[in-house]
Amino acid sequence: MQTIYRKTCYPTLISALLLLLLAGCGGKIETIKVRPLEFQAQAISDTSPAPQNVVPNSPRLARAIELYETGEFTAARDALDQMLWEAPRGWRVYYYLGRAHTECRQYQLAQSRLEHSLGLAPAENVTRSQIYLALAENLEVQGDPARARQYYLTALNLDPQSVAASEALKRLEGLTQLTD
């Protein structure tokens, strides 16, 4: 058993530590969760089927979304975070986790989760528009209206019927006119 542990966990742990050193942690050290290599290889492989609990009708995902929609952002974030380790390919998990992080004022994590969601999402314009909308909202609350505007425009280009994107653009235009 100990031999298997060394083969699977030590290289991952060493890689994580090297990444920290190379990236320069700037005085901050964050918690790193490490998974065995064979689990990571399965999660990354394009030939492996998607885990069953990624299905949009998953009761666990539905419950986490319900928590988010009722304003229980911390509970939703925790439930979705747990799902990441079990189902690393679910774009909806990353999407709602990013939105929950935004509500919990964890903007960098939100941006990262939402960008990852975009990479996993299907090539459907309405779906991708919703993700760009969430990315834009996250940037707007951080005080970056220029980048937020770009994401709102992308959302509107993907889904010209998006009322939320068009209202957000009007709101940003109004703010721009007030500051001029």
Image (cartoon, grey):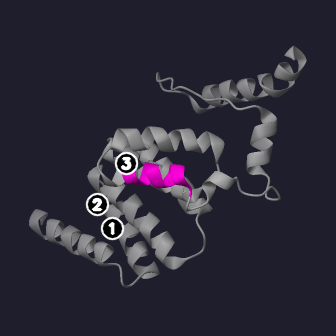
Q: Residue at x 75, y 29 (%)?
A: 12
Instruction: Answer with left or right where residue 108 lies relative to residue 23.
Output: left
Which residue was labeled with disc 1? 149
Which residue was labeled with disc 3? 67
Q: Which residues are magenta?
A: 58-66
Viewer-proximal residue among 56 and 157? 56
Disc 2 or 3, which lies upstream in sequence?
3
Q: Per the image, is 61 magenta?
A: yes
Q: Are marks 1 and 3 in contact (CB under 8 Å)?
A: no
Q: Position of residue 37 (x, y in %)?
A: 79, 35
Instruction: Answer with left or right where residue 70 lies relative to residue 99.
Output: left
Most common secondary structure along the magenta stretch = helix
Label total for image: 3
Res 39 label: none
Indicate the amino acid at tag 2: Pro
Considering every residue shown, the one lying at the far left of the view is 178
Helix, strand or loop status at disc 3: helix
> Is 150 situated above or below 46?
below
Viewer-proximal residue among 100 and 66? 66
Q: Are marks 1 and 2 in contact (CB under 8 Å)?
A: yes
Res 145 label: 2
Q: Residues within 10 Å of mark 2 (few under 14, many from 20)?
A: many
Q: Residue at x 55, y 38 (%)?
A: 82
Q: CA distance from mark 1 to mark 2?
A: 6 Å
